[in-house]
Image (cartoon, rainbow, N blue to C red):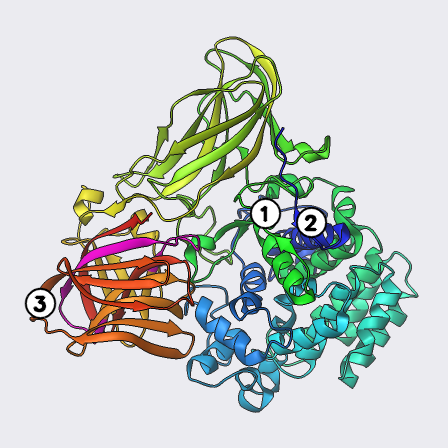
């Protein structure tokens, strides 16, 4: 069996505890999300104690996009995006906010200026106020600056500093100061120091002492001392502490709608009273009310780090329903469909770079290299007929190999089995309209004409026949299935490849593997890895009515349009062309694709009506980092946006007629960016800051229809 092991100088404990911390984070958020905003007495009356997921009881999906998750795994990318500086600044992290946040759409609670702390800070950054002034009491007021949001994104800043609480505090202070100030920043630093120390210290009192030593705010020190004293007197009666908190540190004693101190004390009380029981600690945090998903998410991350995977697995099956799945919703739309393995790799890469050690990420998207990981693979929810697959689990739970074990029973003629993983948004959000919910804004992770490669291990003398399949959104906006050729699985390693069929621009919702057999068999196979890389061979969008024949001017909400992530004010399906691009000011960026698109050409015909600048973007890494080939102000140019810096790499005079239909083509190969207009070479520039990334459009101060859009891989 070909086995891929992790190539790292980081200790096995750090690797496992980072993964456990990330699992703990998402478990806590998903537990708390279902009752976010509920009063303590309402939770008590409805549930008593919440020991497990209650999303079905409140008619919510389990796997949801959430600010606590997206912000945690996006904002720490400031490290990678800036070369992993150990002395990262709040100003750099603030620029990362602007790069990955799409206003009114992604990551944050968009509650308004002076109502949502993070929204307020974003508006300051957008106005040109750098961090930390963007989150300061001086600018935003004490009530706004001392809310809970300072610590809800902080876990990854601790995880990249295992055993180094001092540097974790330094980074946490810079990160929290983008949006907060005062006691909120101190609480975030307190949490980060405890989490960083928890990689090598498990005793709760010792950890709280460590965290206490970093606090600079006397009010927070007094509150934590009071809490520790109260917890020491109640034994196992956590509700006594909750009543005491209501009497002494309730919301009505602090300004703002979600103050830091009450929630931070709930987090610490749950840690102390939960002891070394992962489930019990989360039960207390969620059953106590206030900001349930934030508190449980931070606590789950802390106890995942402190106690490891065994603690998560010692109670009910938290991991099975989640299956590692995470939505990371930001301007990098192709990175949204993620999982806890992918995010752990990113954290470990930063950890290794910061401490000067080696860490080589898996070369495959799906390698299942962490204990028990399944990376979103489950029995296919769209399976038709009797399901012969009984379970999926990681091979490393029972043997010295990584991979997805696919177990089947009574596979026979007429009875098949299938597993699949999500690659794009669900057909329906699966929620009630009055529930708190962040929209899943994403681009697909998989595209038609890409090549999928898998390594499958056959354990038996007689193994199933397998075939790949995809579900995609078809011309009628419904899910249709396409299947690949069948492959016989021999005993041992089997390399299987499939070029995804051309779906004519329609996005792919799932990819899976189907098992079949001409005789009854029971057993298992192993999916050791699965991957696809690089730009599609030929991704092509035609006219809107080619894509959706039943399109009407009054119903233009299509899944193929939703496969683009837009920071333009208005981006829509155009009834007569393909897309309508419209933005009233600068930097209306509209993108699709993933970070592993390297060498490719992108093209579209743009009808040049009203605009200051318009063209195509390439190698997009957030909506403030990209190259573009554009026309503007009587010129054709290749431009580069790098955070707040705008640079014209090459430019020539170029005259256009009013309402001219102009074919744009931008090619990127190695460090060369080339612009073609109406099939004629115009200019070329060289730059190597961005080596890969997605593609799309840019529109500034105007409206331009686009006819067609294509991406073709350059070998």
Which tag is nearer the camera, tag 3 or tag 2? 3
Percent from the top left, x then y, of residue 584? 26, 75
Left or right of 341 in this view: 276: right
Count of all numbered marks drawn on residues in the image:
3
Q: Which residue is mark 3?
A: 659
Q: Residue at x 71, y 78 (%)?
A: 186
Residue in front for this viewpoint, 605 or 534: 534
Question: Marks 1 and 2, how far apart in space?
Answer: 12 Å
Left or right of 70 in this view: 440: left
Magenta residues, start to end: 591-613
Based on the displayed image, in which of its 4 quarters is residue 624 positioned? bottom left
- Describe the element under mark 3 as helix, strand or loop: loop
Which tag is nearer the camera, tag 1 or tag 3? 3
Percent from the top left, x then y, of residue 30? 61, 52
- Describe the element under mark 2 as helix, strand or loop: helix
Q: Which mark is residue 47?
A: 2
Q: Are marks 1 and 3 in contact (CB under 8 Å)?
A: no
Q: Which residue is mark 1?
A: 55
Task: Check disc 3: other Cα within 10 Å, few if <14, some if 14-19, many if 20+.
Answer: few
């Amino acid at each position: 069996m070909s086995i891929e092991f992790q190539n790292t100088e980081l200790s096995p404990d750090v690797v496992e505890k980072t993964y456990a911390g990330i699992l703990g984070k998402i478990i806590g958020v998903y537990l708390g999300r279902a009752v976010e905003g509920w009063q303590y007495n309402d939770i008590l009356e409805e549930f008593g104690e919440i020991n497990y997921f209650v999303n079905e009881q409140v008619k919510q999906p389990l796997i949801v996009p959430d600010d606590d998750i997206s912000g945690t795994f996006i904002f720490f990318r400031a490290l990678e995006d800036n070369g992993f500086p150990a002395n990262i600044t709040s100003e750099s992290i603030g620029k990362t906010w602007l790069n990955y946040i799409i206003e009114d759409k992604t990551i944050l609670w968009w509650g308004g200026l002076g109502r949502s702390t993070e929204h307020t800070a974003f508006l300051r950054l957008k106005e040109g106020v750098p961090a930390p002034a963007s989150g300061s009491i001086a600018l935003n007021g004490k009530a706004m600056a001392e809310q809970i949001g300072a610590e809800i994104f902080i876990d990854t800043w601790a995880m990249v500093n295992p055993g180094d609480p001092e540097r974790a505090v330094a980074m946490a202070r810079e990160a929290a100061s983008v949006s907060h100030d005062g006691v909120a920043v101190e609480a975030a630093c307190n949490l980060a120091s405890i989490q960083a120390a928890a990689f090598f210290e498990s005793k709760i009192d010792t950890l709280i002492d460590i965290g206490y030593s970093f606090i600079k705010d006397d009010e927070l020190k007094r509150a934590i001392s009071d809490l520790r004293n109260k917890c020491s007197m109640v034994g196992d009666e956590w509700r006594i502490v909750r009543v005491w908190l209501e009497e002494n540190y309730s919301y009505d004693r602090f300004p703002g709608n979600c103050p830091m101190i009450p929630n931070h004390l709930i987090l610490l009380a749950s840690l102390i009273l939960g002891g070394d029981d992962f489930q019990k600690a989360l039960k207390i945090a969620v059953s106590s009310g206030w900001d349930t998903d934030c508190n449980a998410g931070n606590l789950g991350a802390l106890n995942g780090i402190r106690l490891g995977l065994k603690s998560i697995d010692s109670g009910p099956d938290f991991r099975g329903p989640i299956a590692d799945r995470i939505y990371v919703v930001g301007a990098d739309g192709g990175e949204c469909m993620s999982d806890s393995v992918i995010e752990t790799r990113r954290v470990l890469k930063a950890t290794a770079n910061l401490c000067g050690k080696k860490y080589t990420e898996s070369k495959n998207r799906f390698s299942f290299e962490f204990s028990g990981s399944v990376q979103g693979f489950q029995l296919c929810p769209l399976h038709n007929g009797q399901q012969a697959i009984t379970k999926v689990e990681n091979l490393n739970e029972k043997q010295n190999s990584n991979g997805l074990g696919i177990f089947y029973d009574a596979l026979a003629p007429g009875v098949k089995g299938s597993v699949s993983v999500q690659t794009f948004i669900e057909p329906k959000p699966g929620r009630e309209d009055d529930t708190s919910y962040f929209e899943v804004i994403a681009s697909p992770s998989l595209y038609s004409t890409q090549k999928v490669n898998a390594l499958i291990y056959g354990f038996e003398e007689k193994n199933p026949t397998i075939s790949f399949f995809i579900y995609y959104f078809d011309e009628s906006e419904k899910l249709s299935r396409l299947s690949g050729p069948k492959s016989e699985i021999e005993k041992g390693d089997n390399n299987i490849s499939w070029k995804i069929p051309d779906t004519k621009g329609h996005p792919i919702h799932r990819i899976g593997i189907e098992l079949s057999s001409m005789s009854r068999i029971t057993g298992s196979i192993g999916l050791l890895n699965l991957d696809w890389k690089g730009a599609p061979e030929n991704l092509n969008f035609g006219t809107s009515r080619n894509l959706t024949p039943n399109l009407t001017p009054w119903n233009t909400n299509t899944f193929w349009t939703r496969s683009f992530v837009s920071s333009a004010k208005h981006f829509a399906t155009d009834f007569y062309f393909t897309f309508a691009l419209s933005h009233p000011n600068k930097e209306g960026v509209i993108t699709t694709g993933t970070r592993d698109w390297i060498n490719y050409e992108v093209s579209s015909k743009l009808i040049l009506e009203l605009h200051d600048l318009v063209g195509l973007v390439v190698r997009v890494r957030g909506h403030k980092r990209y190259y573009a080939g554009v026309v503007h102000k009587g010129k054709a140019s290749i431009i580069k946006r790098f955070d707040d810096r705008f640079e014209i790499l090459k430019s020539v005079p170029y005259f256009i007629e009013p309402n001219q239909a102009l074919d744009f083509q931008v090619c990127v190969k190695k460090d060369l960016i080339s612009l073609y207009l109406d099939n004629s070479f115009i200019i070329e520039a060289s730059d190597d800051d961005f080596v890969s990334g997605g593609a799309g459009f840019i529109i500034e101060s105007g409206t331009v229809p686009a006819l067609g859009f294509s991406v073709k891989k350059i070998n």
